[in-house]
Image (cartoon, helix red, strand yellow):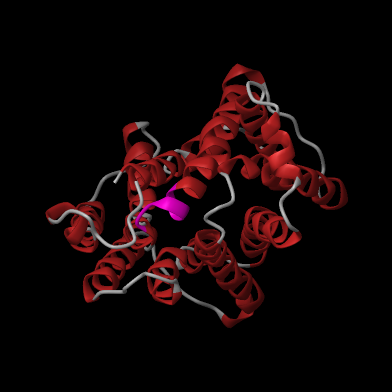
């Protein structure tokens, strides 16, 4: 249960992404990613400062671990930004957010895991709730944006694949996420220099938003997620991930940047009910197979 809760804390932190990003000004996406992942790297380095041997643990990891970690973190963001540049953000975001459902379904392929009807039903309820949230102002798919839609779909498969395969590398310590963040920051910087004009945050609020992004949704969240998917209940985490857009919308409403309507109320019921349904074995029984505390 503890590992699952730690993984869920990443979902809570990701719900702050929209508000903090909107508050960060007009910083281009790859520049913002480079800045935030640098802060995320600093989090890991600070934790390792008390035990220098951890640095060697990171460096000793085999190539597949590095390809998985950097491919997951950088690959997801590269494809997500590509999708937003080449397709309407609402539709692209919805396609990209298929990753929780893909995690739930794909978990059936993991050793020692059993996919139950409640996991699939809970994930589908969460997906439907997410559709209600993102389609409040209309939703349409146009074949002119097929490239962007394709990038968004690859984005979903990238993050779900990273999450599922991380489970297979369960013996790799979470410290290695420090290296993943560092290389992702470097690759994001290179993309920024090649594709974007540099725009710095203006004022204390925008700088604070960038710092908040690097500390939480683009920093500590990745460490928490790594720990959760390796040691917690990955099916529940996949289903619960649909809480992120709901929490994000509620936070925006509370901050005065959004408006509540019936879509939000119904989505709340669907996403919460789906999460409870998927977690029923863990909530009402002890010692579920595959849960490592």
Lateral position of residue 272 relative to residue 186, left or right: left
Of the pair 52 and 145, the residue shown nearer to us: 52
Asked whether the viewer can see residue 28, the reply is no
Lateral position of residue 229 relative to residue 41, left or right: left
Residue 205 percent coordinates (x, y): 57, 21
Of the pair 202 and 9, the residue shown nearer to us: 9
Q: Which residue is located at x 37 percent, y 63 percent?
A: 135
**Image quarter for residue 112?**
bottom left
Q: Which residue is located at x 60 percent, y 33 percent?
A: 214
Q: Is residue 84 above or below residue 223?
A: below
Residue 62 percent coordinates (x, y): 73, 57
Q: Which residue is located at x 22 percent, y 55 percent?
A: 287
Lateral position of residue 236 relative to residue 270, left or right: right
Residue 102 is covered by the magenta coloring: no
Looking at this rendering, what residue extends furthest in the top direction? 204
Residue 16 percent coordinates (x, y): 45, 38
**Image quarter for residue 182?**
top right
Lateral position of residue 227 relative to residue 263, left or right: right
Q: Is residue 42 above or below residue 180?
A: above
Task: Please count the marks in the image.
Answer: 0
State which region is magenta.
228-233
Looking at this rendering, what residue extends furthest in the right direction? 194
Residue 18 percent coordinates (x, y): 48, 43
Q: Is residue 159 above or below residue 200?
A: below
Looking at this rendering, what residue extends furthest in the bottom direction? 143
Q: Is residue 142 above or below residue 94?
A: below
Q: Main secondary structure of the magenta part?
A: helix
**Image quarter for residue 276?**
bottom left
């Amino acid at each position: 249960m503890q590992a699952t809760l730690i993984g869920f804390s990443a979902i809570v932190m990701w719900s702050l992404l929209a508000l903090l990003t909107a508050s960060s000004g007009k910083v281009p996406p790859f520049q913002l990613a480079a800045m935030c992942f640098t802060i995320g790297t600093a989090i890991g380095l600070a934790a390792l400062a008390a035990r220098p041997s951890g640095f060697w643990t990171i460096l000793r990891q085999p190539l597949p671990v590095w390809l998985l970690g950097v491919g997951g973190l950088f690959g997801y963001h590269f494809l997500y930004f590509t999708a937003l540049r080449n397709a309407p953000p609402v539709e692209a975001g919805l396609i990209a957010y298929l990753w929780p459902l893909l995690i739930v379904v794909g978990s059936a392929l993991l050793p020692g895991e059993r996919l139950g009807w409640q996991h699939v039903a809970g994930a589908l309820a969460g997906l439907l709730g997410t559709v209600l949230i993102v389609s409040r102002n209309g939703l349409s798919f146009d074949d002119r944006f097929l490239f962007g839609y394709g990038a968004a779909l690859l984005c979903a498969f990238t993050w779900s694949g990273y999450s599922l395969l991380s489970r297979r590398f369960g013996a790799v310590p979470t410290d290695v996420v420090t290296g993943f963040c560092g290389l992702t920051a470097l690759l994001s910087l290179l993309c920024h220099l090649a594709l974007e004009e540099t725009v710095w945050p203006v004022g204390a609020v925008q700088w604070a938003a960038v710092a908040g992004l690097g500390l939480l949704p683009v920093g500590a969240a990745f460490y928490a997620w790594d720990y959760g998917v390796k040691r917690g209940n990955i099916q529940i985490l996949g289903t619960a991930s649909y809480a992120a857009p709901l929490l994000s919308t509620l936070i925006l409403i509370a901050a005065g940047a959004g408006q509540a309507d019936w879509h939000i109320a119904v989505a709340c019921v669907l996403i919460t009910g789906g999460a409870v349904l998927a977690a029923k074995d863990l909530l009402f029984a002890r010692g579920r197979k595959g849960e490592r505390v």
